[in-house]
Image (cartoon, helix red, strand yellow):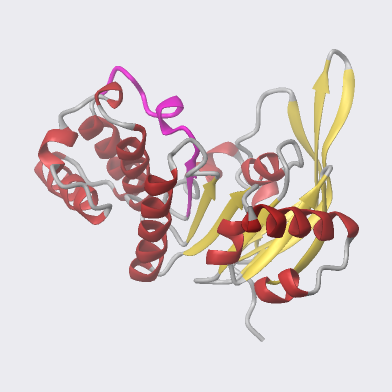
Amino acid sequence: MQRPLLEVKDLAVDFIVSGQKIEAVKKISFSVFAQETVVIAGESGSGKTVSCLALTKLLPANAHIRCGEVLFRGRNLVSFSEQALQAIRGSKIAYCFQEPTSYLNPVYTIEEQIKEVLWFCQHIKGKQARNYAIHLLEQVKIKEPLRVLTSYPHQLSGGMNQRVFLAMGLAGRPELFIADEPTTALDVTIEQEILKLLMDLKKEYNFALLFITHNLAIARKIAQRVYIMHQGLIVEEKKTEELFSNPEHQHAKELIAAYEKIGKI
């Protein structure tokens, strides 16, 4: 039997706020197989983003993993040192977040930022790195890669910056690509373009995709399996069409009923 690329077991994450412990993620378990597309869906504040940041310990200083395992190709990332995790982030597991201008550095050009990833993940530098950066921008369907390469993030649109962020994710040739609400801040037309681009890139680069969203329309469109998350717990997991045709948990039923109602408006 095939083993999951990523297997999360009883992962719990707490925050300490004003001396009080807040349980943000409450012993969740989920898996992603190689080249699979999995969606974790749920309302804002359900713990989706915290769960995914915890996979490679990209948590704020006041958060900590209370218990659980994050097995990536059978190795528990929770036990990894910061130095060991640096070899995983980007080159094995890449992230793409919403509102990319919050993550792109405003004082460096796009070229400098992509080349930094290429050096860190693949030890490519100089002219080779520049040519590779141009290739990556072409891969994400940027029509003027040379202009974008020399631009700063504030000189580009939100949709263009999201494409740049995707290119930076591809730079390490990851096995798992985590996309956390990457289309939320975009208009509907650009959202559809980015979704199609992401799925095309998945097919070409053969990575597994873990997609985080509150939008069930996106989940239904792209996922092979869907996990529903609510109040720090995963309350249901099914193959996509089975979930939409036969939800069992009350919260999943309510989400799908709302999704279907909106679709009829």
Residues in magenta, as a range: 93-108
Please tell me which residue is depicted at 89% across the width and 26% down the height of the picture: 21
Residue 102 painted magenta: yes
Viewer-nearest residue: 89 or 33? 33
**Image height of 135 relative to 127, above or below:** below
Image quadrant in which the N terminus is located: bottom right
Please tell me which residue is depicted at 76% across the width and 41% down the height of the picture: 46
* Displayed quadrant of residue 251: bottom right
**Image height of 193 relative to 35, above or below:** above
Viewer-nearest residue: 112 or 241? 241
Please tell me which residue is depicted at 28% across the width and 38% down the height of the picture: 114
Residue 243 x %, y %: 74, 70
The reply, left or right, for residue 194 in relation to residue 27 is left
Residue 165 x %, y %: 37, 41
Residue 67 x %, y %: 83, 46
Residue 66 painted magenta: no
**Image height of 104 relative to 252, above or below:** above
Q: Residue furthest front?
A: 265
Q: Residue furthest top?
A: 18
